[in-house]
Each structure stands twice: as structure tokens, then as C-alpha cells.
Amino acid sequence: GKGNYRHFMEKELHEHPVVLGDTLRQYIDPSSRAAVLPELPFDPAVVPRLTLSACGSAYLAAQVGRYWFEQIARIPVDSDIASELRYREPVVPKGGAAVMVSQSGETADTLAALRLLKQLGQKVLSVVNVDESSMARESDGKVLTVAGPEIGVASTKAFTAQLAVLACLALGFGRARGVLSAEDEARLTAALLEVPAHAAALLENGEDIQDLAREVVQARDVLFLGRGSLYPIALEGALKLKELSYIHAEGYAAGEMKHGPIALIDPAVPVIALCPSGPLFEKTASNLQEAAARGGRIMVFTDAIGAPSLRRFAERVVVLPTVDPFVAPILHAIPVQLLAYHVAVLKGTDVDQPRNLAKAVTVE
Ligand code: F6R
């Protein structure tokens, strides 16, 4: 049941710390601070390319995974939504591998893409939450997220658990390929192991996000911006807001604004930006400043390092815990989910069962 929570989604949001802890403990050895790879159907040291595919939020988790596999493990990656990949006549290399991501393990398009990639000779590894699912059965290998049952239609804890698994895989692959030093691996696993406590702190201090929700609920359109591994999280923020509150939202890469979307900037269209400190901070901040100069109302998620300079032009600054840039997408996923939740509650929409949606999409 829902216990003391109003909705399954609220309960599942509050399970983030436990789920992240359970999932990370599965794939990190805390004493050696090394990523623990599951049994794999391919050798990550020599795999020529990974094809990533999934649908919806699971696809956005895969998109974050793509940044990690490239940056940390230096593996060439192709990624696409499953409904496109399956009809694209994709070109895959001999000896290549695929990583599919799915909470249910039953999504029709993802399952079809999995079957196609197997037919094309790829070794398929699935990141799934349901062990006895079709995808778990049909894959050459599986990695389980330890999220427990997810009842709310909108993915919450399963999404961050997918990110946690992909992060650990990227570290393990980086080590296997000889491109990640033991020192860096220890630093990055330590950063991951701190995420559950940061998630708990963030869930306890949700007032800024509720205030932000009171602004957002009045909007007809909302823009979400991010760069690098925060770009897929901006897309996730927009997806969650659309599906839960029925408010039109778009996610963009911050650097793409001047190629069209900046024309949308208007005081009536709140701009929600994900801008933690890190190598891309200055670039993102300057894109936001350009939007502010054109009358955009900037509302930003950042950390204590990024906050002072953003406060000069942003209308609202929500300060999240300061973390290694590697884990920032996991931490930022939680407030964008919370924001969509609070906006939906304010609007009175059906949070656990949004209109027209099903938990597992078993038809294409
Ligand atoms: C969005 C959401 C969906 C699912 C998608 C894939 O909040 O939950 O976009 O992520 O339908 O579902 P699975 O992960 O079961 O393959």
C-alpha cells in the first residue's frame, strides 16, 4: 500500500535513498572502492561499439549512460529510441554489443529492438528491474536494478536506479579497457556511494521545490535546459512535467538555444535550468544569462559553488548538495521528478495514473 503517503509516486520518490543504496551496494565493493561488474555476455575490453536503446525515461537514462560510456570508458556508442532503432536498418559492427534499459522488461518496442540487435549478431545486455521479464529472459545477459516494485505510472526510483547501474558499468568498463586509473575509480565510486545520503537530504528540504511548483503551475509552456549529462535530465524534467501535469514542456541542450528555441523566450515561459558546478558550468550559465537578457525568467538547480554567480540574473536558485560532476545527473533527476509531482498535485491531476498512459507499454 501507500502507507502514509498520498500517492504511490510520493512514496516511491521517498524510496530513492534506499533504492540507490541497495543498487549501488550491488555493483560497488565499498572496501576496495571498485566497481563490481556482473557476468557479461561480451568483453568490455575489446567491444568495438555499444548500441543503447530504450523508450521514454529509460531511454533518457541510456542517454546519460552514453555520456558516461564515452567519457569514462572511451567506448564508441550509438543510441536511439527503440521505436526508431527497430526500423532504421541500423549498421552495427561485428563483435558489437547492445545495452537495453527497461523498468518493466516488457516494453514492446524495446523488446523488438533487442530481438533485432540479437539477429544482427550483437550480444545484448539488459538493465531491467523485473527479473522474470521477457527482456531479462531473451537477453544474453542481464543487470538488475534493485528498485523494488514501481506502481506509479511515471518512473521515479527505477530511473535513478538505472542511472546508478549504468554509472557502475561505465566505471567497470573503463577499468577493463585500461582507461580509468584505480585512483579515479575510487574517487568516482566514493562519489556514487554518497548519493543516497544527498538524496535523503534533498527529500527532507523540499520547500524550495514546492515554491517553484507554485510558479510553474501557472505556466502554459515551460522550457528545461541542460548541457552534457544534464541534458538528458532536462529532457526527463520536461517529460515528467508533461505526463503528470499536462503542461507543455520542452527540453533543450542549453547550447542549442540560439539555433531557434531562444525565440520562445518570454516572461510567460519559465526556463528551468540544470546548472551544477563543473566543466560545463560557465557555458551553461552564459546561455542562461542570454535568455535572462531577453526577458526569460530563469529558475535554476545548482549547488553552493554555482549559486552566487547565477543569483545575479536568475529569479530562483535552488541549491542542491555539491557533488562530483559525474554523479550530478543522478542527483538532479530527483528534484525534476519532485517538481513535476508537486505541480501535478497543485493542478489536481491523477498523479499515479495520468490520462492515456499505461505502466508497461506492451503494444507498439
Ligand atoms: C516516464 C515513463 C516512461 C517509461 C517508458 C519505458 O515517466 O515511465 O517513459 O520510462 O514507457 O518503460 P520501461 O522502462 O518499462 O521499458
Image (tube, rainbow, N blue to C red):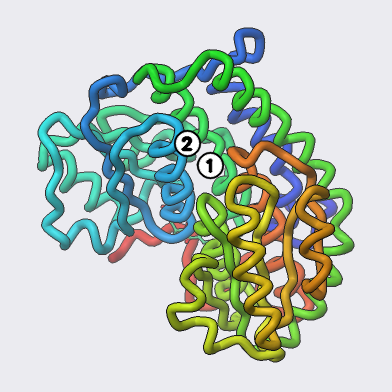
* 354 on left or right of 4: left
Amino acid bearing label 1: Leu
- At x 46%, y 55%, the residue is 60
Which quadrant holds residue 220?
Answer: bottom right
Which quadrant holds residue 207?
Answer: bottom right
Residue 194, image x and y in percent?
Answer: 73, 30
Instruction: Residue 286: tell me if it is visible.
Output: yes
Residue 231, image x and y in percent?
Answer: 52, 59
Name the residue beneath numbered marker 1.
163
- At x 78%, y 72%, the residue is 314
Which quadrant holds residue 324?
Answer: top right
Q: Residues within 10 Å of mark 1 (few under 14, many from 20)?
A: many
Q: Please give the label number shown on residue 228.
A: none
- Contact check, label 2 and label 1, Cβ < 8 Å: yes
**Looking at the image, residue 312 lies above or below residue 307:** below
**Looking at the image, residue 134 lies above or below residue 258:** above
Q: Which of 108 and 23 is in front in this view?
A: 23
Q: Please give the label number shown on residue 166.
A: 2
- At x 28%, y 65%, the residue is 364
